[in-house]
Image (cartoon, rainbow, N blue to C red):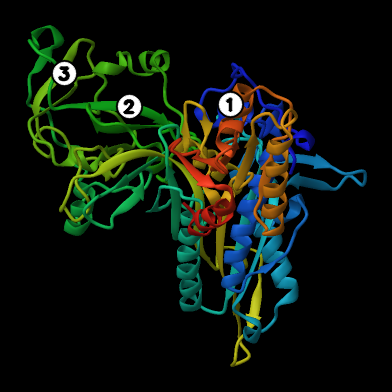
Amino acid sequence: MRASQYLFFTLKEIPNSAKIISHQLMLKSGMIRKLSSGLYIWLPTGIKILNKIKKIIQNEMEKINACEILTPIIQPEKLWENSGRLNIYGQELLKFYDRRNQKFILGPTNEEVITKFIGDEIYSYTELPLIIYQIQTKFRDEIRPRFGVIRSREFIMKDAYSFHSNSKCLEKTYNIFHQSYINILNQVNLKFRVVSGDSKSMGGNISHEFQALSENGEDEIVFSKNTSYASNINTAESIESVNFTKEKKPNIHNSNIKSKKSIKNINEFKKPIKNLIKTILIRTKIKNNSSIAALLIREEHQLNLFKIEEIDIVEKPLSFINEEEIVQLMGVESKFLGPFGLNIPIFADVSVYYMKNFTIGANINGNFFVNVNWNVDIPIPTIKDIRKITKRDTSPDGSTCLEIKKSIEIGHIFQLGTEYSKKMNIMIQEKNNKKRNVHMGCYGIGITRMIAAIIEQNYDQNGIIWPNSISPFEVVILPLGFNRYIHIKTIAENLYKKFKKEKIDVMLYDRNERPGVMFNQIDLIGIPHQIIISPRHVQKDNVEYRARRNKKSIFINIKDIYFFLRKKIDLNI
């Protein structure tokens, strides 16, 4: 491609709306332009990168014998009613009527569509296993789109689905996809972790997330450097919780226990209160006197909202009772709230269960009970794992301390089992002529957010530094004085023709710009290999090779530059 025929659309200034580096650089380098909140136009530089990632994914899918299809982005709402996910997704679904007054949604994912399709086409175990995939635009009506394409309303993803006659076959394919995703992310040079995931609204019991490390990530992952343990922070268990489960401790509710502890006024505490348990009120689904519940957690810990929402009676999304309501209901400020005399469900974190001689709110403003113990001064409530893991925790096997890092979820794979086939009555006939529900796996990769994650890990003060495999161009020829010096122009044109003939993705910068503008523009869009042709160096039959990643320059004879470059591209360096 000649630069004179290319649409750069680079910017000098960073738009005020762009808060993180990937969003800023995608706008500055002319990859995307904002159309509306969470909606972006993809420009030539962005499209080239998208297409190269798609090609990597398609090659990997071909290796595992996955067949490519394409489904409509518009889906009948009835399918989502059948699967039971219409209310789960709620307002994230963009719903509308067609001219025939039929209800449709703009698809955020395709489990329902694919399950129905397979149910209409597959009848016998002999037609399984089967893997299909597509690369398609999705839409989720995010309440707060942000971070550019990391959390946009419209996005591009690869979603794959596998179908099996039994769980053993599903597990085998699941493991194949697990390795395939590792291969894909390695090819784009992402630093990532594979962690145990939460299945959220997808269903199924087993899932793994592929998380790219990034300080601007919305997720947090927990992992051990010395063991294979890794988990999304939402599902990460403390060693206390693991031990509690193993010990099978009973939940004792003894309402006859009367507190014998004296009350201590907050003014009597000389230092910050230690060994303190907080009491927090939340709403429940129960519409009577128990429409609220209490959570007990150590002062230094944070609630894990995902774990709390897993409690059956808890209202979803989780809703806290605010300060004004607490004073009206309990007659006490929230910081002095305690579980004493509360005729409501009470859930205590596992770490609270192991505490002794603790301090807890007395349900009297300004006062706490001190040196309190379970089953002596207060009955044991229902014990649940409801807190976030901290860096002070150890891995579930107790062998090593944990690390917590922010990350961007790039991929997620699920063993759905018969979750959808049961709901949608998808059956196959077995050898014995009996019918059973088909087993299903689901495997997604967010392509647009993958691009943002790669930028988050590969940039400097001058712009993006693309890996060879997905750069918009593999090499750029930068002739100084292209329109002034015939000799420079001839060398540049010859190299350009040679590279194109040898199938190297090359740009010839033939625009009439000053060298400073030219270098700034090329550094910004991040082409990994630069060949600079200058009047001074061609006198010695040399050109300058410069690597974008480290700015290191090497002077190479013109006749050797192709072989030098070919080696670097082939070795992906």
Residue 249 visible in the displayed image? no
Residue 179 visible somewhere in the drawing: yes
Residue at mark 1: 520
**Which label sits in the foreground, 2 or 1?**
1
What SS does tag 2 mark? strand
Tell me whether circle 1 and circle 3 mark residues in contact (CB < 8 Å): no
Identify whether 488 is placed above or below 239.
above
Task: Please state the horizontal and vertical placement of residue 54, each as a whole percent of the image.
Answer: 64, 55
Mark nearer the viewer, 1 or 3: 1
Q: CA distance from mark 1 to mark 3?
A: 63 Å
Q: Amino acid at mark 3?
A: Phe
Left or right: residue 132 compared with residue 298 = right
Q: Secondary structure at mark 3?
A: strand
Of residue 131 and residue 127, the one placed in the foreground of this image is 131
Secondary element at tag 1: helix
Q: How many marks?
A: 3
Cα–Cα gap, marks 2 and 3: 15 Å
Q: Residue 515 versus residue 521: which sits nearer the camera? A: 515
Residue type marked 2: Ile
Residue 492: x and y in percent read: 68, 42
Q: Name the residue: 57% across, 35% down.
A: 151
Quarter of the image where one finds residue 247: bottom left
Which residue, given by chain and number where applicable, does mark 2 sit on? 280
